[in-house]
Image: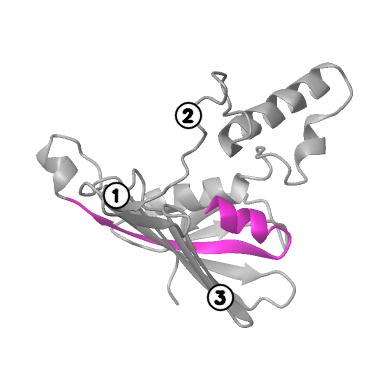
Amino acid sequence: IDWSEWTLAGIARPIRVTATGSTGVAHAKGMPTEDSITLTVQWENLNDKTLGCAVYTSSWVAPKSDVHSQQRFFYMGTGGEINVDQAHRGCTVATDATGFGSVNPLFMKYTPTNGMFSGQGSYGVKSFEKFIDACRAVNDGKSAPSDFDDGSLATVHTTLQGTAILQAGRQSLDGDGIPVDILYDGDGHEPIGMEAHKFA
């Protein structure tokens, strides 16, 4: 969801969310929550009001696998498509000694280089570094928080649509799958509310 919000900033906005859930495993363990949730999100292009559709699924009940987290992304547009298998990074290795395996780069580099920590080049550490640098700049009066609403960091203003999608999804689940409309002020891109969809 956050990737869609980031790449579609100023281009499209989410206007409707319909959610479905799978249950059973968590309930059997005494946890009253869904095992998997799928959100179908209707996106509206800002320039011509044409519509697009995205489907997002999250599941925390899964069998043992070759990776910690199965993360996939597929985009089909009018001019092309993108396939991403983030869990595998497109790299598998098979040897007589170890058999088949997925060489999956982790969130950071855990093994030392020359006996020293060497994970600082990973995206996990870099994201913390950029956040701390931004906090210092704001605290030192060199920047304002709004300076980072340009997409360089996740801020309240750059994550409002994603937050609205998640909240609308929760409301849809709680309403037995009723679509939930995300409301805006005119052609704005920051959500101002949401309501159950009214069918004509």
Quadrant in the picture for residue 148: top right
The residue that mark 1 highlights is: 66
- Amino acid type at image mark 2: Tyr
Residue at numbered disc 3? 81
User: Position of 129 compared to 100: left or right?
Assistant: right
Disc on the earlier residue, 2 or 1: 1
Residues at discs 2 and 3 in contact (Cβ within 8 Å): no
Q: Which mark is residue 26?
A: none
Residue pointed to by mark 2? 110
Residue 17 vs residue 66, the one in the foreground: 66
Q: Position of residue 36 (x, y in %)?
A: 28, 52
Vertical order, 44 against 94 (above or below): below
Q: Is there a contact, CB below 8 Å, between mark 1 and mark 3?
A: no
Mark 2: give few (<14), some (14-19) or many (20+) Cα within 10 Å.
Answer: few
Q: Residues within 10 Å of mark 3 (few under 14, many from 20)?
A: few
In the figure, is residue 25 to the left or right of 88? left
Q: Please state which amino acid type lies under the numbered disc 1.
A: Asp
In three-dimensional space, the C-alpha distance between marks 2 and 1, rounded to whole angstroms, equals 18 Å
Does residue 99 appear to the left or right of 89 in the view shown?
left
